Image (tube, helix red, strand yellow):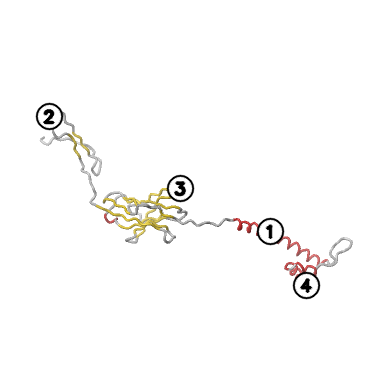
Amino acid sequence: MESKTCYFFLRHRRRTKECIGPKSKSKGLLASPATGKTCLCACVVELILGFVLTVMVLPAASQMMTRRPRVRIDPVFLTSNSNITVREGGRAELPCTIQHLGTKKVAWRRVDIDRFLTIGENPWSPGDELVVEHVKHSEELEDWTLVLPKVKKSDAGLYECQLTAVAGFHTVVQLNVVGPPITEPDVILNGTKFVERGGKIELQCNATGGKQVADAIDWFKASS
């Protein structure tokens, strides 16, 4: 009976009169010790619960009311040149400039053969002769340039710079390869072709156009 009275006391405060007896005229104590202790316990429990709810719920509710709604900012591609032409054997740089990237990852993909080339700054296949040059201009602006050091005819095609795990965010760059490659002669001779007898002649030999630096340069006269 006492537990039933306390239950209703916690749920409806108007029912507490059922468990409170007449007060003593001398000391103001509860006339019914058992019932009084039960109701006193219920009062203490209710006060503790009220305090806990006040401490926990009100700050959270206040924070929810004052918290500003988060505005979602989608990434934006700022790449301007989407058509690159490079001679065979030259260096190709495919631009990809992104604003508001955040924590998302950047990947390069060859569209026409459906093959990933890089994830972040790492090549998809270790043997690929390519590199990603990542330059972070600010917290909101980054460059993710795909570099092919020596372009081959087979490198021509459509390339895509995309964001992983985010559908619809990508930009494409068309790479055109023309050829054959321009090669400089191994040795270039410069000088005066005709001089007067007894005059001075100067000849220059440039050997920087070869595939490797010459160890030494020797001069010979054709008739000797």
Mark earlier in primary sequence (2, 1): 1
Indicate the secondary structure of the residue bearing disc 1: helix
Residue 187 image offset from top left, x and y in percent: 20, 40
How far, Cα to Cα, is label 1 from label 3?
44 Å
The residue positioned farthest toward the front in the image shown: 80
Q: Which amino acid does label 2 sit on?
A: Glu
The residue positioned farthest toward the right in the image shown: 26
Q: What residue type is labelled 3?
A: Ser
How far, Cα to Cα, is label 4 from label 2?
136 Å
Q: Name the residue under label 1.
A: 54
Residue 121 image offset from top left, x and y in percent: 40, 52
Q: Name the residue under label 4.
A: 1
Mark earlier in primary sequence (4, 2): 4
Residue 65 image offset from top left, x and y in percent: 61, 58
Indicate the secondary structure of the residue bearing disc 2: loop
How far, Cα to Cα, is label 3 from label 4?
72 Å
104 and 138: which one is in front?
138
- Residue at 18 percent across and 32 percent down: it is 202
Circle 2 packing at 10 Å, graded few (<14), some (14-19), many (20+), is few
